[in-house]
């Protein structure tokens, strides 16, 4: 495979311009994640606007060297930084500029150096750095780039991929570091913005501009169980938020450190960054007048913005309210395989606890998900007969109202979740979901672990075998053969929808072939193929 | 003098029914590119749905102008001095605004009451129909408006969607946005709650959808009036009517078609079951 060992200044600009557009696509979603430091729902917008200003300046760079472009970006970001996240972003670009100082183009080592600088300078700009924010994401991303380079990789795309992966993992971990995120069931908004920017840059380098035009960035879901509601977590603090005050101070011989010290006691979330001629100040204060008075003595104020954060917070709550379903019951599902977890997530499960055949979660795992889910009324879908009992221990261990709908298979879990009635109250919903189980048949295909004889079947080791609602009733030479044998046993007269979840060991192409053969034999059925990514079972099939 | 009833075209009250009940229907507008049509007047439902699924650009919709209402008010004012207007949910359309602005422009002694139905389609239509019936029995404006307000709280709508694409694109998805983004192909069932679209549940097929709708109404007890509507699948709607025939006398079940303006958001293969719960 060809490697990209050197990136020119022009490409540096183009990759972050692409990253900026990529970010714009999800700025509204990022706004909605925003709970820290103040849940005012503007992080995505702020980062987007900061990126715009960053890139406008980048196009005005005096030359096309990497150094020139990076310095222009840093300047543009400082001049146009908006909000906490914007100011931190401007510091990240400043680190990049310092790291690429004097470079015409850059290689893998330069990139790793520059990202290191970005992390260091980003931390320095913030008076009280908090972990679990975009600072942490920046630090972890830089460390990954460094590790990759140290391992001898010279391909910049590979370095960026490592950076993005690490940023994603770090981002997913932010709720573990910052309680307010955990309570709200979101990842850090600024971190999400930064991740999206890196991801956009990586995709540009990979040449995926067409794909970027068609798709949207992914919002990382927190690894800790995701919860349905953000309002309560965001609304507990009764303390007034005061005014978000930000401006650019221009003058001579300005000293960011001294200014920072002077402003430290005037408010929260203080950031002071810049150089001798221009300093950007961001502070959450109850007395913006004092801050302004102080600043006017030092120089001239530009782009002054003083916003009442309580108002912003109200808008934010309204915004969240619009997104929330009307129910107060949350559903937690157990599933293994990223595809299956996504299926449950996409259907509205508040959390997915990893687990399934051969890897049963503990009662504690499920309990933890229950406790960290915002709702007080929770329905658990164990989705495996060996997990039902474990799940049934949970109600006694928590003060929350918990019911277990005894789903024995993934298809039963999906059917139960779909049947969830948004208008029904807790107990009724559990009943409705339990009743829905009768409407689905489950086929599971796996491989025999030994040669044996069971239910009148002669089974060889590693041969595909099929279970119908948990009973081993078919064996065959191929997965397709087993699936067809099982379908033949079913009365498909009333069936309408067949959903095939193919596992980690199965191929998409084979799944499509089997799907086509089912459609051929049973033209009245609608067959859907989904990557479940589950271990152990090459296929889990639902017949409704 | 008899009270005159006015509603808008989203009530799905057909021309024939409007004539029979002495109702006036003010059309909204639906637009395909440069072509603007009055809902159900300049474009038939058949023509609309054909274009909805075949044309590359989606239609857009516009509320009636205040002047549209003003003209109707002025015309009716020659026959009566009491008008009751029942409009589509103000959370879904600006029609309520237009109707209200027009009211302020009316000179003379004609009194006009405007009721926000907080519903749409026959959920709104059934309120207008029951008001028309009350007026026929001699209800005054006050009485009719009072009854209409009570009917608003008794009106229910359950809608089966083949896709939420149209609703989401049209910005009317409300609290049902949580149903978007499913990795499985699911058919959402929504209701209208406090005037906004709100989720009920999801099914995997039309027949499961029919089962669900039947189940809801069967569990409701007394129902005063009901209606079944479709966008592009009359047979499915007829099948539902057939089943409902086991619960209600057939003549109580009204049958209509989802109007182009509502169809812009409901999309093809949508069904709506609406009913007025009996007054207590």
Image (cartoon, grey):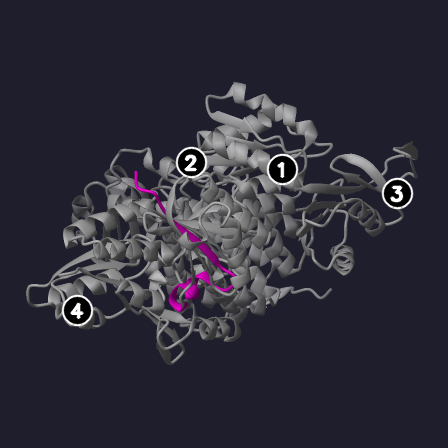
User: What chain is tagged by disc 3?
Assistant: A
The residues tagged by marks 3 and 1 sit, at their Cα atoms, a distance apart of 30 Å
Q: Which mark is residue A328?
A: 2
Residue highlighted by disc 1: A437
Q: Which residue is mark 3?
A: A463
Side of A33 where A171 appears, left or right = right
Q: Nearer the viewer, residue A312 or B268?
A: B268
Q: Are there few (<14), some (14-19), or many (20+) residues within 10 Å of tag 3? A: some
Q: Are marks 4 and 2 in contact (CB under 8 Å)?
A: no
Chain part drawn in magenta: B260-280
**Separation (CA) of disc 1 from disc 4:** 57 Å
Image point (51%, 29%), residue name: A370
The residue to which callout 4 is attached is: B76
- Chain on which label 2 sits: A
| Residue A351 horizontal/vertical position (percent) | 54, 38
Question: Do tags 1 and 4 sit on the same chain?
Answer: no
Give the chain letter at badge 4: B
């Amino acid at each position: 495979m060809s490697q990209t060992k050197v990136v020119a200044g022009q490409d540096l600009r183009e990759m972050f311009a692409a990253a900026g557009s990529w970010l714009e696509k999800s700025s509204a979603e990022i706004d909605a994640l925003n709970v820290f430091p103040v849940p005012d729902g503007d992080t995505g917008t702020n980062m987007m606007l900061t990126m715009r200003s960053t890139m406008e300046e980048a196009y005005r760079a005096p030359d096309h060297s990497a150094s020139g472009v990076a310095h222009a970006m840093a300047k543009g970001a400082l001049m146009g930084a908006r909000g906490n996240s914007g100011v931190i972003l401007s510091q990240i670009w400043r680190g990049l500029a310092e790291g690429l100082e004097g470079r015409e183009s850059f290689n893998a080592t330069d990139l790793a150096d520059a990202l290191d600088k970005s992390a260091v300078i980003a931390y320095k700009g913030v008076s009280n750095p908090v972990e679990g924010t975009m600072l942490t994401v920046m630090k972890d991303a830089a460390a990954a780039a460094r590790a990759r380079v140290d391992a001898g990789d010279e391909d910049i795309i590979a370095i960026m991929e490592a950076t993005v992966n690490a940023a994603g993992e770090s981002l997913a971990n932010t709720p573990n570091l910052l309680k307010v995120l955990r309570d709200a069931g979101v990842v850090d908004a600024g971190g999400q913005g930064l991740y999206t920017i890196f991801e956009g840059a990586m995709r540009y380098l990979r040449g995926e501009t067409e794909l970027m035009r068609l798709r949207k960035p992914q919002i990382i879901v927190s690894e800790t169980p995701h919860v349905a509601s953000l309002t309560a977590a965001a609304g507990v603090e009764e303390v007034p938020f005061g005014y978000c005050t930000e401006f650019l101070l221009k003058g001579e011989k300005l000293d960011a450190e001294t200014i920072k010290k002077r402003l430290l006691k005037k408010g929260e979330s203080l950031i002071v960054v810049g150089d001798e001629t221009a300093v950007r100040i961001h502070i959450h204060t109850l007395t913006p007048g004092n801050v302004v008075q102080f600043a006017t003595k030092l120089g001239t104020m530009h782009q002054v913005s003083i916003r009442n954060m309580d108002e912003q917070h109200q808008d934010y709550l309204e915004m969240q309210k619009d997104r929330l379903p009307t129910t107060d019951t949350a559903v937690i599902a157990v599933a293994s395989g990223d595809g299956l977890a996504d299926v449950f997530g996409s259907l509205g499960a508040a959390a997915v606890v990893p687990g399934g055949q051969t890897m049963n979660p503990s009662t504690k795992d499920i309990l933890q998900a229950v406790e960290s889910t915002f709702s007080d009324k929770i329905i658990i879908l164990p989705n495996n007969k060996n997990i039902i009992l474990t799940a049934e221990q949970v109600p006694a261990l928590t003060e929350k109202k918990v019911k277990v709908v005894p789903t024995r298979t993934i298809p039963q879990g999906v059917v139960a979740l779909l049947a969830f009635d948004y208008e029904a109250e807790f107990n009724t919903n559990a009943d409705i979901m339990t009743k829905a189980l009768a409407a689905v048949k489950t086929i599971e295909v796996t491989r025999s672990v030994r040669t044996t004889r069971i239910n009148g079947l002669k089974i060889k080791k590693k041969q595909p075998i099929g279970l119908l609602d948990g009973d081993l009733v078919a064996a065959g030479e191929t997965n397709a053969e087993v699936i067809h044998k099982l379908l033949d046993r079913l009365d498909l007269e009333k069936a309408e929808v067949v959903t095939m979840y193919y596992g980690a060991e199965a191929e998409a192409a084979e799944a499509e072939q089997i799907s086509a053969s089912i459609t051929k034999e049973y033209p009245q059925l609608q067959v859907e193929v989904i990557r479940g990514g589950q271990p152990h079972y090459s296929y889990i099939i639902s017949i409704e | 003098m008899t009270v005159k009833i006015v509603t808008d075209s989203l009530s799905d009250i057909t021309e024939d029914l409007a004539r029979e009940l002495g109702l006036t229907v003010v059309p909204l507008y639906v637009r395909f590119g440069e072509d603007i049509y009055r809902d159900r007047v300049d474009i038939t439902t058949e023509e609309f749905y054909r274009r909805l699924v075949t044309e590359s650009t989606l239609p857009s919709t516009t509320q009636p102008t205040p002047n549209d209402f003003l003209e109707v008010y002025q015309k009716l004012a020659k026959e009566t001095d009491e008008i009751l207007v029942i409009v589509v949910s103000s959370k879904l359309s600006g029609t309520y605004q237009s109707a209200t602005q027009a009211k302020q422009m009316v000179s003379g002694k004609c009194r006009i009451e405007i009721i926000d139905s907080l519903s749409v389609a026959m959920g709104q239509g059934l309120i207008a129909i029951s008001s028309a019936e009350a007026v026929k029995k001699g209800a005054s404006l006050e009485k009719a408006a009072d009854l209409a307000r009570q009917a608003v709280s008794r009106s229910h709508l359950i809608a089966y969607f083949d896709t939420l694409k149209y609703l989401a694109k049209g910005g009317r998805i409300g609290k049902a946005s949580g149903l978007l983004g499913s990795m499985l192909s699911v058919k959402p069932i929504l209701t209208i709650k406090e005037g906004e679209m709100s989720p009920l549940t999801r099914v995997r097929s039309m027949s499961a959808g029919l089962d669900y709708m039947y189940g809801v109404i069967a569990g409701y007890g007394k129902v005063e009036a009901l209606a079944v509507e479709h966008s592009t699948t009359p047979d499915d709607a007829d099948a539902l009517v057939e089943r409902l025939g086991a619960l209600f006398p057939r003549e109580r079940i009204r049958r209509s078609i989802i109007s182009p303006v509502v169809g812009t958001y409901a999309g093809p293969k949508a069904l709506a079951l609406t009913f007025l719960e009996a007054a207590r």
